[in-house]
Amino acid sequence: MDLSYILNELGEERENYFNAVAPPIIQTSNFTFKTIADFRAAMSDEFKATLYSRGHNPTLNILRKKLAALDNAQDALVFSSGIAAISVPILALLQQGDHIVSVENPYSWTIKLFQSFLPKFGITTTFVNGADIESFEKAIRPETKLIYLESPNTFSYELQDMQAVANLARAKGIITMCDNSYCSPYFQKPIDLGIDLVAQSATKYIGGHSDVVAGVLTGNREVIGRIFNHEFMNIGASLSPHSAWLLIRGLRTMPLRLKQSFESAKIITAWLQQHLAIDQVIWPFNADFKQSELAHRQMQGCGGMFSFTLKEPSLEKIETFCDKLQHILMAVSWGGHESLIIPTIATIAKDDYEINNDRHQLIRMYVGLEEADYLIKDLEQALDF
Ligand SMILES: Cc1ncc(COP(=O)(O)O)c(C=O)c1O
């Protein structure tokens, strides 16, 4: 399906709403029925009906169709956060006694899900080095039900070879799931590489303007239906029609935004690499990236987020650099119009900082939609110690 068709037409039935170009926000919790027969049919299979907005809603359905098509998936569910799009399917598909093999260091709340939340239900997780396919193989047990990936990682950018992991999992009847927030479906399609379920924080590139928190899960219709009929409806982390409308609007410009962020990231990483105060720049599409071949094989482009380290990575130097920035904002998250910075030191207590710990030294930058030169000027003055 053409990308332009998906973003501009798919799912939209303009003749049903005055030929308006923008779809309506169907701001309703409830839907009515003319006959008991229709009402009963909807109640008996809510996945196929529009009954109550905790389940389906017409504005959300437009978004679901577009998001499923972008991933080359049969269906999609949207959630009120990215972490709900990760937690709900895992709660739906795993049972007490099941085991997960997860890539190490996924998103912080995913770690908390695996380490604190799921053990309450007797589900355990083994974390492995995702760059090494053998480490997945070694960690698999008879009770392993899920292999969880996040490629690339959104702080240190390690990748997993999704085709190799999918082949291994399929042979053993294990479900695979990948957090694709870093690339978005514009730059990477895990389902085409054999992955079963794809989760994404739609808060990032799908929304694209830092004004919505949302999540998306895509996969095979039968599995998506199973998740909908139980944990999705029970947990009730559904998205509001207004937020769905903002995401449809965000999708219209997603390719333009991603291209701009990608191009600016190329310029800014090259500039940082030659700066005397900079030690390393870590970005999957840099020539010296340790998994560069894999990055180019499975990604069609690269998210505009990277990390770098200072040649003198004292806590004070990192703090001074970040405090001096005038236009690049200090904040969590990414994927919006505005460029952001977050150093690891902001995520740990001052006394826990270890100067020789590679992860502690990282300063993560997300490149938004500002001109590259404008951002470089800001970095230059902040690096002038
Ligand atoms: C890689 C990754 N996955 C998932 C999430 C969770 O998304 P949300 O904040 O929309 O719940 C985030 C949030 O920052 C993230 O960075």
Image (cartoon, rainbow, N blue to C red):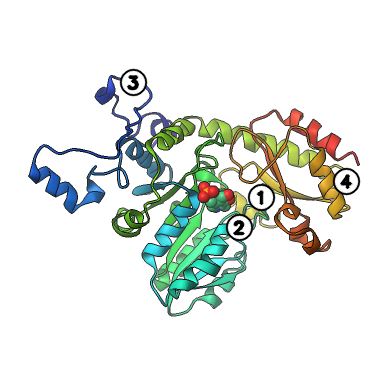
User: What numbered label is drawn on residue 159?
Assistant: 2
Q: Are marks 3 and 4 in contact (CB under 8 Å)?
A: no
Q: Is residue 230 left or right of residue 206?
A: left
Q: Is residue 193 left or right of residue 22?
A: right
Q: Which residue is disc 4 drawn over?
A: 277
Confirm or deny contact between disc 1 and disc 4 (CB under 8 A). Answer: no
Crowdedness near tag 1: few (<14), some (14–19) or many (≥20) residues, C-alpha within 10 Å: many
**Residue 14 in view:** yes
Q: In the displayed structure, does residue 57 sit left or right of residue 378?
A: left
Name which residue type carries label 2. Answer: Leu
Q: What x and y, as percent, mark residue 310?
A: 84, 50
Q: Along the polypeptide, which appears first: circle 1 or circle 4?
A: 4
Q: Nearer the viewer, mark 2 or mark 3?
A: 3
What secondary structure is marked by label 4? loop
Ligand 1 lies under 8 Å from the Cβ of mark 3 = no
| Res. 155 mark | none
Q: Which residue is mark 3?
A: 20
Of mark 2 and mark 3, the one earlier in the sequence is: 3
Mark 4 surroundings: few (<14), some (14-19) or many (≥20) residues within 10 A: some
Where 293 sits versus 205, above or below? below
Q: Which mark is residue 284?
A: 1
Type of amino acid under label 3? Ala
Which quadrant: the N terminus?
top left
Locate the C terminus by quadrant. top right
- Between 353 and 349, the one lying in front of the other is 349
For badge 4, the amino acid type reads: Ala
Task: Residue 150 in the image: state x and y as whole percent.
Answer: 55, 57
User: Residue 267 lies in what quarter of the image?
Assistant: top right
Dot in front, 1 or 3? 3
Do the numbered discs 1 and 3 sit on residues whose CB atoms are within 8 Å? no
